Amino acid sequence: APVSVRQHKNKSHARVEEGVSPAPKKQRRNMPDAKDDKQRSFKWVEVSSGGENFRLSVTDVQKDVFKSIGRRPHKVNANLISIFGRAREGKSFLLNCLADSDGLFRISNRPVPCTHGIDIASHWMDVRDFSIVDGGAELTNGEGVKVGFVDAEGQGDKTVEHDANICCPVLLLSKCVCFNHKGAIQKDDILSKLGIMARAASSVAKEVTAAQDSPLIAEPDVDSGGSGNSSQGIAVSGGSNELSAAKELSSATEPENVTDAVEVVTAQDSPSTTEPNNNTGGADESMPEIMDYHESFVYREESAEQTTESVEQPAEHQAESPEQLVPKQFGHLHIILRDWNSEDFDTVAIHDMLFAMEPETDASAHDGSETRNEIRKEILAAFESVQVWLFPPPNDSGKVLRTEMSKSDMCEEFRDVLREFRAALSTQLEVPKTFAGMPLTGKSIQLLMGRVVESLNEGDVVIPSGAYKAMLSGELNTALREMEADITGQVTALVESIEKTSQEEVFSESYIMTEEEAIGQCEELLVNVQRTYDDKIRDTICDESSEFGRQLLRGNDYGPVVESTKKLRRDYFKASYHDIFSRWCQRANKEAMGKANERISAIMRKIDAASNPVDDINAEVGTVLEAMRDIAGLKRYPESDAIRSMDDGFTVFITSQRQQVLAYNEAKVAAEEKAREEEKAKAETLEQERVQKLQQEAQSQAVGGGGCGAKCCP
């Protein structure tokens, strides 16, 4: 891959750009210290103590940490700065300096490590704010990108597998990775430690992507860099010939031809036997054998045919094969050499000493060069770029160095290098880190950590696209469960509302809604809930602008699931409505029959007083039927089979009652006629008796007027 190197302007550390003066002490301390609970570090990943069977676990506190990134962490692009290295060599102090916040990560001069597992700070900085700390130049890009800080457990105290598993998830999610080293500079020693990262890379599958789907990764700007314009950037941007199938650990990783690169020292010219010692400034002639645990590394081995093809294949031919693009697995690697006092070596020489390939001979397998070359290949293939930094001691006073230092204790020389380092980081951080080609956000980092840890615990190879899709699927499933619960709750509330109405006593004034109205309300509810969650899913999880989103939203995990959920709730609602309506009809029928019986009884009582004309009776009985229909709501539910059936019952009932009333009225008429006839006969009898009496009286008077007047004569 093309490699670019820029030489230091002066000795072993970077210089601040001319015209930019250090910020005054008051300004340097304008960022709040992490002494309170609002800004401090939390345990992100814990390691169970189980010997060889250790497991990683993500803590619950990470939810609160990522919420502190903003109210909408799913919308905020986030880049992590992580730091690795041996324990008790000042990693946490350097991270606190970068975060411009004392006490963010706990530091100590005691012999026991301060950090166990992986810590993450709740302190997030806008990348522009990050760039201007201590007088740095403000970035013109990177608006809205947040910077987070991660401190990893010190390596070297546990097994290689333990350290590699700790490194792997953080390396995958970090934009900038700092490797902290303090002590003599021996390539065996440093490459042994970097070999842990190489081992971590072997746990991540290399996925081939097409050119149009490859992530847009910003290349380091070697001509800029804010207040430091002399950084030593080694930008590695190859990878087109590094092909591997997902889940395969054995694939071709031969780097591209670098003979045409500018200012690059070839492997044959690189210092392989003389290594600088940063404490004495001289050369270390010793060549200790590389550490034994290198034998446990799982490297990708390529066949002779693949090696030949990768070497002979012209670069222009590779560029014409977009299907062969292999994105880098990790972000930018910064190798930080601490407490550097030597003036004999600069970053270019050290970079070449560490990463220039050693010529392979018959003795390569015995002198460690073969293993070192394998580590170099892995590191250069895994990281987007590799840079070397030479940091002087943070303070010239040995007494201060033995205390728990703060950022105010930094000497000016240390701050100069830190400014240039910050400028280089800022340039890289202004572009969001991608994972499986997708830019990382606060929310996706939080969720992906759990997915990666789960794969590592199971001993599986981490497949970034699979992990990303699994993350989206998990979030989508959660949203679908929330939608299902929401739909169920709202449909149940609608059913309860209808049930309440159905229990009203005044039927004619509080009719239960029709089936058409009820189904209409249910459908409107389903549409509104789905629209709400569609918007939420596309806003917070994925949309169809990415291949992952298209696969999920157009696949069987979304549309069919939503329709199935709606169908189940729709069927439940219909069944519930029919059940409620059936009970309501029973109550309405009972109410109507009761009212009808009262009206019929009143008509009968009226007939008891006197018979009524048949037409009047028919009309009055007809009003009873209409009242029954009003109670049942025949006009409101003309299409209801239950109502029509009930109306048929009303008609039969009223017909029967009409017949009974008419019969009763007819009997009343007959009784009244009979009573009249009897009264008439009685009257006639009385009249006859009266007439007879009158006749007798008249006869008596006539006889008395013509007699003799004696007592014997009447």
Image (tube, grey):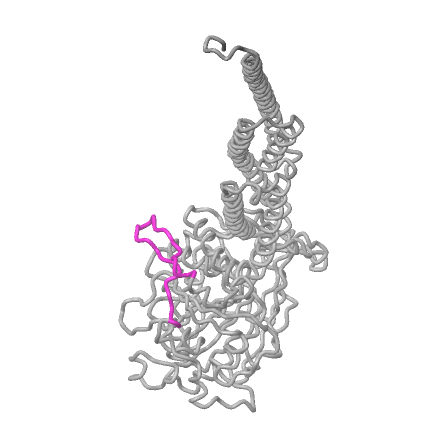
Picture layout, residue 233 above or below residue 27? above
Residue 606 in view: yes
Residue 681 in view: no
Q: Position of residue 636 (x, y in %)?
A: 64, 39
562 or 231, which lies in front? 562
Q: Is residue 112 magenta?
A: no
Q: How many marks?
A: 0
Left or right for 366, reference 597: left
Q: Position of residue 306 (x, y in %)?
A: 61, 49
225 or 486, which lies in front? 486
Q: Position of residue 33 (x, y in %)?
A: 38, 78
Q: Position of residue 411 (x, y in %)?
A: 40, 86
Picture layout, residue 74 above or below residue 599? below
Q: State the image quarter where residue 150 is shown.
A: bottom left
Picture layout, residue 310 above or below residue 188? above
Residue drawn where x is 39% and y is 81% of the image: 407
Left or right for 635, reference 470: right
Q: Is residue 56 magenta?
A: yes
489 or 246, which lies in front? 489
Residue drawn where x is 61% and y is 28% of the image: 612
What span is colored magenta in the figure?
38-63
- For the N terminus, which image quadrant? bottom right
711 or 67, which lies in front? 711
Picture layout, residue 71 above or below residue 557? below
